[in-house]
Structure formats: structure tokens, C-alpha cells
């Protein structure tokens, strides 16, 4: 059952940010599968007077390929509406004159085609999945331990996510591994970074209190959004676990069985 | 240069514990290579009136095969003198009625031959090296996340060690990864665990203040021994790094360029 309290804020909303994996679809073999009712939910939000953006920690593909996949799954989504960590990371590299060693999924590499990677002075890790071999992690470690001031960027800090065949370790796990190996603290680019959420709000031209984030990750989606002053709602799909509803540090402003129910509740409150 | 202060305690010593990898030999292709002067240093200690034991976090081979390797490298060492984590772990499993899922090096598996591993209710990780694939780490994660009370044992908690071709990530890095993934705290079996050091002292029949530990790992060898009331000396071989001598939390009771020099200093103080 959805909490009864949370749709109350729906009337004053001007925008919604949706997480993608675990909310609109479950990843897995091929393109993965759309979560029941989610294609229709996106359609209904787009037809409403709410602004809509998609904020994701997806780093297994370039934004172009990722959006193409979403479209194949039936979603009416365009590249300019989707905010993944890699483009944000590239902006940071330019700003600080850094040349990365990449430990990322092969599918993400083309995103960094125009970036100078010679003689690296930082390491970027993304959700490399099978590419998180001992050898590749060791290589990233050796780059870091060889730097006078080691800098590690992590594209997200998730613990795990759900694919169609079960839970999979996410980038945050390997971030912690390298943090310990090199005795350093990584800089997270992506959710729950405040800078990252703020860039989406800037694009919408809205204030935090006017926006609601819907995600399956209690800490990174819901907690991250709340830290920025947004409302955060958790859906019981994707990596959701019942224990999330008794989490010691983060309490969602609301929960819903899935994104279809969440959108229903929002729009019915607004008289749609 | 060795510190001038530390050999002062040598006169009152009754025993010495030596770390193995990075102190007596560097691991690598084949058996690795003995560190210059180390075979002779062991011989001299054995010929002295000091008791001698070897305390290691080595988990890539059974104790039997590991000691055979040391003997091929020229060391006069027998199995009963060597204390690795795996036999200690097996004792803990029996005591607590636990059945492990193993994420360990193939070379260590035979050590667990007599252990019930059906329907596992805990995970043991050792220095699995190349076996720390994404798939294997994910498998260990799924066992843990599926348990009502997940128990993770880590055979050591080292960050990295030195092989002949460079630094390699150690088991502690993957312990941190699984700790974060499952939001738990691992139980460390091996150095710097107090219980582990105490089992060596018990075998020697000595009090902590009568024993000196010599290792290349400032935190796990030196700091661990000091926490038990022993003296701890660091050698500048193996994983030693100059920054160890400015470590914020651990200060060795002495340093020496290598084990040969350390043994020289101890024995000359004792009038040998």
C-alpha cells in the first residue's frame, strides 16, 4: 500500500525527476524489460503540466546508446532530458585539467573519446561489471598509488542493482575497495551528489521544493534528493527491499508499489 | 639506517615472530625469491636461545604446500612453526557451527576439504587474487545478502602486497567491498587480530612483553603486535613505503633495512 501522506505535496509540484533502472525498467539480457505500467506512466507525465527529467547513474553505455535502448523499450524519451554521470565527469576533468585512467564498461568508453588520457593523473570508475576483474582493479590501484595526490572519481556510489537474473554489485563497492587500498576518499559524480542533482534543477529552471524525485534507491535517489531540498518517493521495484522502510537514516516522503501507482497518485491529486 | 633505540629491548627477549612474505621472500612467478640475507637470518635465530615462530596472512596455498615452497627457497622451517589464518578459521567454523561459502585461491581449497560447505551460512574470503572476478565477488555477495544474519570472515585485512612484478591488491580491499555492499562488518581472522597473535604466544608459552614481531606491514604486523603488548619492528622490504615512518597512528619500536640487519642488531645486543 502507498503511504497516504505523500501525495499531499503533489499539488504544489512543478516538476518530477525519474530514476531509470529499477523504476522504468529492469536491466538484464539484451535491453532488459520495461516495468509494468511504466511506459504509460511516462506518457501521462509528459501529457501533464509537470516538467519531466530523467536522472540516472547508468554508466554502461553512452547517453546516445542508452537513450536508444529506452526508446526501443517503448519510452518517449530524448537525450536532452536524460542526465547521466559521464558528461558531468567530462566537465569536471576539463575544469580541473585532469587526464583520466578509465575503469569503465566498454560501452561507456566512446563518451570519453575526445578526452586526453595520456599520462593519467586521476582515475574514473563507473559500473564496469564484468570488467571489474582483479587485473583491471589492480591497474587502477597502481595508477592511484603512483600519484603524489591521487584523485579518484566514482560515477555513482551504489551498492548493488537488480538485473533480470538477480542482484549485481554496483560501482560503489569498487569505490570503497580503492578508497581502502589507497587510503583516500573518492569524489562521487552522479547521484547522490548535490552538484549533480542541482544541474538537473538548473536545466528545469525550478527550485528544489517544486520538484519530486522518484527512485528505487532509498539512499541515492530519495536521500540524495531530500538533501537538496526536493521531495523523495521510493517505489517498491528494482533494488527496493522491505527493510528500506525501516532505514535508520533515510525516510522517504512516500512510497508506491511502482511508478505507475506513484504517477496515478500525483496526477489524481492534481485533478487530472 | 636502523633506529638506534629499538635493539635495547633485545636483551630481555625470549622469542621472535617473523612475518614471511615481504620479510623473508618476495612472492611472484614460481616460488618468488628469497630476500637477501634472510635464509641466513633464520638460521642464526634458530641457532640462538630465542624461540622462533612464523606468523603469516598467506592464504594462497595450504600450510603444507606453503611450507614446502619456503623450504625450496632455502629456509629451514617446519609446518608446526607456521601460523596462517586458514587453520584458525576452520577452528572458528567448528566452534560456531558455520558452513562457509569460500571465495579463496584455488591453492587454499584443499585446506577446507573436511569442512561442510553445503547450504552455506557464512562467507570466507582470502587472498583470491585473479579469482576476485566480478562474478565470484557477486556470488559471495548474493550468499551474504540472502542470509538473515550475514557473517563474513576475512583471512587478513591487508591493503596490498608486493610481488616481484609490482604491488598487488590484497584481501582487505575485497573485505571492504563486501562490507559496503552488505552493510556489515567483517570478522578478521589473521593478523592484526588479537586472538590470532595470542594463539602464537600460547604456542610459545611466552608473555607478550617477551616477544618481538618483525614485519613489513606497519599496521597489521607492527601495530597488531603492539596492540597485544609485544614489540613491533618494521623492515624496509616488501610493502614498506617511506611514508610508513610518518604514519599518524602506528610507530614501530624500531626499523631495519631488512631482516638480516634486524637479526644482526638483536643478536649483537645479546652478545652473540
Image: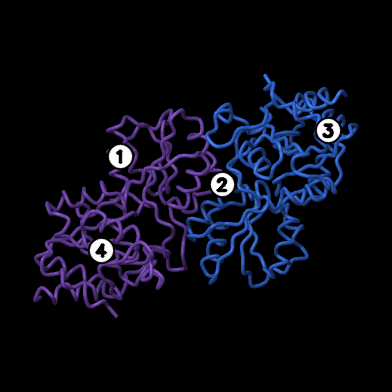
Chain colours: A purple, B blue
Residue contact between numbered discs 1 and 2, judged by CB atoms under 8 Å: no
Assign a secondary structure to mark 2. helix
Q: Position of residue A211 (x, y in %)?
A: 17, 60
Q: Position of residue A169 (x, y in %)?
A: 47, 58
User: Is residue B267 toward the left or the right of residue A253 in the image?
Assistant: right
> Disc 2 marks which residue?
A134
> Disc 4 marks which residue?
A232
Assign a secondary structure to mark 1. helix
Residue B42 - label: 3
Residue contact between numbered discs 3 and 4, judged by CB atoms under 8 Å: no
Q: Is A34 located above or below residue A200 in the figure?
A: below
Q: Residue at x 31, y 42 (%)?
A: A89
Assign a secondary structure to mark 4. strand
Instruction: Check the residue under mark 4 and report the chain it is in.
Output: A
> Disc 1 marks which residue?
A90
Q: Are marks 2 and 4 on the same chain?
A: yes
Q: Nearer the viewer, residue A114 or A238?
A: A238
Amino acid at each position: 500500500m502507498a503511504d497516504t501522506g505523500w501525495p499531499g505535496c503533489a499539488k504544489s509540484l512543478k516538476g518530477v525527476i525519474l530514476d531509470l533502472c529499477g523504476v522504468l525498467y529492469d536491466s538484464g539480457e539484451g535491453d532488459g524489460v520495461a516495468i509494468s505500467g511504466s511506459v504509460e506512466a511516462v506518457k501521462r507525465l509528459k501529457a501533464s503540466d509537470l516538467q519531466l527529467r530523467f536522472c540516472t547513474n547508468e554508466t554502461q553505455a553512452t547517453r546516445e546508446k542508452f537513450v536508444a535502448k529506452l526508446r526501443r523499450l517503448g519510452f518517449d524519451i530524448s537525450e536532452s532530458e536524460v542526465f547521466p554521470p559521464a558528461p558531468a565527469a567530462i566537465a569536471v576533468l576539463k575544469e580541473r585539467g585532469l587526464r583520466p585512467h578509465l575503469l569503465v564498461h566498454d560501452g561507456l568508453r566512446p563518451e570519453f573519446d575526445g578526452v586526453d588520457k595520456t599520462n593519467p593523473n586521476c582515475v574514473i570508475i563507473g559500473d564496469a561489471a564484468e570488467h571489474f576483474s582483479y587485473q583491471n582493479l589492480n591497474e587502477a590501484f597502481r595508477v592511484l598509488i603512483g600519484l603524489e595526490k591521487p584523485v579518484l572519481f566514482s560515477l555513482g556510489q551504489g551498492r548493488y542493482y537488480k538485473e533480470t537474473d538477480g542482484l549485481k554489485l554496483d560501482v560503489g563497492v569498487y569505490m570503497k575497495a580503492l578508497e581502502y587500498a589507497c587510503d583516500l576518499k573518492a569524489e562521487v559524480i552522479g547521484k547522490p551528489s548535490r552538484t549533480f542533482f542541482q544541474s538537473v534543477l538548473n536545466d528545469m529552471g525550478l527550485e528544489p521544493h517544486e520538484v519530486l524525485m522518484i527512485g528505487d534507491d532509498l539512499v541515492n535517489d530519495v536521500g540524495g534528493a531530500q538533501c537538496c531540498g526536493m521531495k523523495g518517493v521510493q517505489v517498491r521495484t528494482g533494488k527496493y527491499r522491505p527493510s528500506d522502510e525501516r532505514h535508520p537514516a533515510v525516510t522517504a516522503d512516500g512510497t508506491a508499489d511502482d511508478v505507475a501507482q506513484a504517477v496515478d497518485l500525483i496526477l489524481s491529486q492534481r485533478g487530472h
